[in-house]
Amino acid sequence: MSQERRRQRRTLAVTPAGLRTGRPEDAGEHLAVIRDASATGAMLLARGNFAVGEELTLGILFVVDQPVVDVTARVVRVETVTEGIWNAKLGVEFTPARPDLVPAFEKLVRG
């Protein structure tokens, strides 16, 4: 059983996201899927190599045909996984916290 690490209530939020690392060798975005989120962070599956402490920009797609929402975050947890095309499970902390996004994450669940 995994230890709860979140300070805020999690919301199931399966939605695509692009990850930008800012590293010179990463010219584009890494593909990711957010699994759950709160006002202070998210858990996601991604492709790529990431390190705890690394700063990221997430481009979150809440609504098709609408602009992505860019969110800055810091990696706080990395696990190696083999779930389909994914090779990393990341815990990220939004910097700063984004309570304004909670309704959008909750709407994903309600449809």
Image: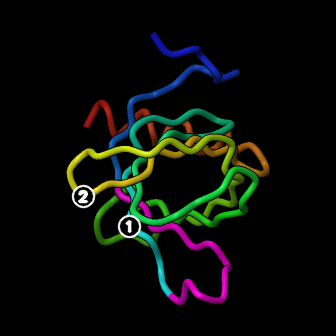
Residue at image point 44% right, 51% down: 88
Percent x, y of residue 12? 39, 30
Label 1 neighbour load within 10 Å: few <14, some 14-19, many 20+ = some
Percent x, y of residue 33? 37, 52
Which is more toward the observer, 67 or 77?
A: 77
Label 1 belongs to which residue?
31
Per the rendered image, the range of residues in magenta is 16-27
Residue at image point 45% right, 10% down: 1
Is 45 situated left or right of 26 in this image? left
Residue at image point 62% right, 40% down: 77
Secondary structure of residue under mark 1: strand
Percent x, y of residue 86? 32, 54
Task: State yes or no: residue 77 in magenta.
Answer: no
Secondary structure of residue under mark 2: loop
Displayed quadrant of residue 100: top right
Query: For the C terminus, which image quadrant?
Result: top left
Percent x, y of residue 87? 37, 54
Which one is in front in this view, the residue at disc 2 or the one at disc 1?
Answer: 2
Label 2 neighbour load within 10 Å: few <14, some 14-19, many 20+ = few
Of the residues shown, which amino acid type is indicated by label 2?
Ile
Q: Which of marks 2 and 1 is nearer the N terminus?
A: 1
Which numbered disc covers residue 85?
Answer: 2
Q: Do the residues labelled 2 and 1 touch (CB within 8 Å)?
A: yes
- Seen in the picture, residue 5 relative to 18 is either above or below; the reply is above
